[in-house]
Structures are given as structure tokens and as C-alpha cells.
Image (cartoon, rainbow, N blue to C red):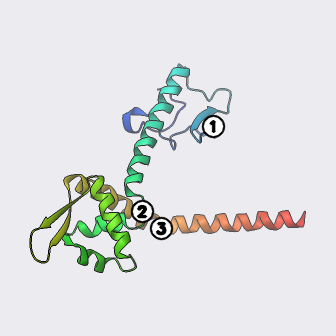
Amino acid sequence: MSESIQGTRGFNGAIGLHDRHPDQTGKRDSKGSEAVSAVGADAAPQGTDATEVHRVLREDLDLIACADRTLEVLHGKWKVHLLFVMARGIHRHSRLLDCLPGVSKKVMTESLRALERDGLVARTIYAEVPVRVEYSLTPLGWSLTEPLIALAEWGSTHAEAVADARAHYSLKDAENGQAGLAA
């Protein structure tokens, strides 16, 4: 790899989107995919060709597709909540409902069924009177708890920086709006 690109390679050797040389910009195509193009005359890495760039872009797109599939599994307001609560052990439907104030019984049941469909949750029915149903994480569900904890820790660590960035953006946006009204 040429020394004109700063940073390291990420998963599968792909250059991460944050690993650009300062003289490069990201452009989005009509489908929203990002490609890196050189701005400066000497910014392009020596010895790279179009196939290298396409290979790197393809690897990035593959990673993005994997992340999108994972996020699709977690899509829904209560799924992540349920995974965190169930990480504390096996739970009956009523106990899960008690742990999540604000969720309706119907919505929680739909979320549990979706998690069960995706293999993250196991439902065990006991032949008792009345019937007892318990939910627990499967090994696949347990494998998702570590990335969720890492995501929660990132949010906790960077919450103030994100809030500051949003405030700065809102201020800048308001200033631009005022400049547009004055013109």
C-alpha cells in the first residue's frame, strides 16, 4: 500500500471510510454508495489501479451489507431492550412485560416472535396448568450481547461529543437560515 494513504486496513483488509488521505473526498453515487476520489494531482496512491479501487469499494460494500443485515435483525423499538433484559436470565412473558414499561403486550409478543424467528431467542412451553412459557437467549442471541454492550459503551463515552456536534450544527444551520433571510 502506498504511503500517501494514511491509516490502517480494517476488516478483510479494506480501507475504512475514515482512513482517507486528507487530499481525498468521498463521493456518493446514485445508489448512495461511497467511492473515494483523489483531489490533489499527486494524491492517488502509486501503483494502484482501477481493480484495486473496485476491490476495496466492493469489500466496503460487503461490510456495509453485513452491518445492514445485522441492524435489520435489531430493527424495532423493543428488540434491543428485550435482548438486554433476557441477558439476565430466562424470563416469563409477564416478567418481560414488567421490565419494559410502555410496551404493549401485543408489540412485545411480536418482537419476541421476530427474535425467535431470527434465532436469537428460544421459547420453551411447559405442559402445566396454566401453561408456562419462558424465553431465553440462544447461543446466537448471546453472541450479539457483546457488540450491543460495546455500542452502549460507545454511546456513553461519546454522548457529550455528539450533543456538542449537534448543537454546533444547529447553530450553524440557524446562522445559514438567517443569512438566507437577509439576502
Label 3 sits on a secondary structure element that is helix
Q: Going by the image, does 25 lie left or right of 52?
A: right
Determine which residue is flagged by label 3: 159
Q: Is residue 90 above or below residue 75?
A: below
Q: Which residue reaches farthest right? A: 183
Q: Amino acid at mark 2?
A: Gly
Q: Amino acid at mark 1?
A: Asp
Quadrant position of the C terminus in the picture: bottom right
CA separation, marks 2 and 1? 29 Å
Checking the image for residue 76, the label placed there is 2
Determine which residue is flagged by label 1: 29
Quarter where residue 42 is shown: top right
Q: Which one is in front in this view, the residue at disc 2 or the one at disc 1?
A: 2
Looking at the picture, tell me which residue is in the foreground, 32 or 47.
32
Callout 2–callout 3 Cβ contact below 8 Å: no
Q: Is residue 44 above or below residue 127?
A: above
Instruction: Report if residue 48 is visible in the image.
Output: no
Q: Which one is in front in this view, the residue at disc 2 or the one at disc 3?
A: 2
- Say which label, 2 or 1, has the lower sequence index: 1
Instruction: Report if residue 20 is visible in the image.
Output: yes
| Residue at the image position 30 percent from the left and 52 percent from the top | 118
Looking at the picture, tell me which residue is in the foreground, 144 or 41.
144
| Residue at the image position 38 percent from the left and 76 percent from the top | 104
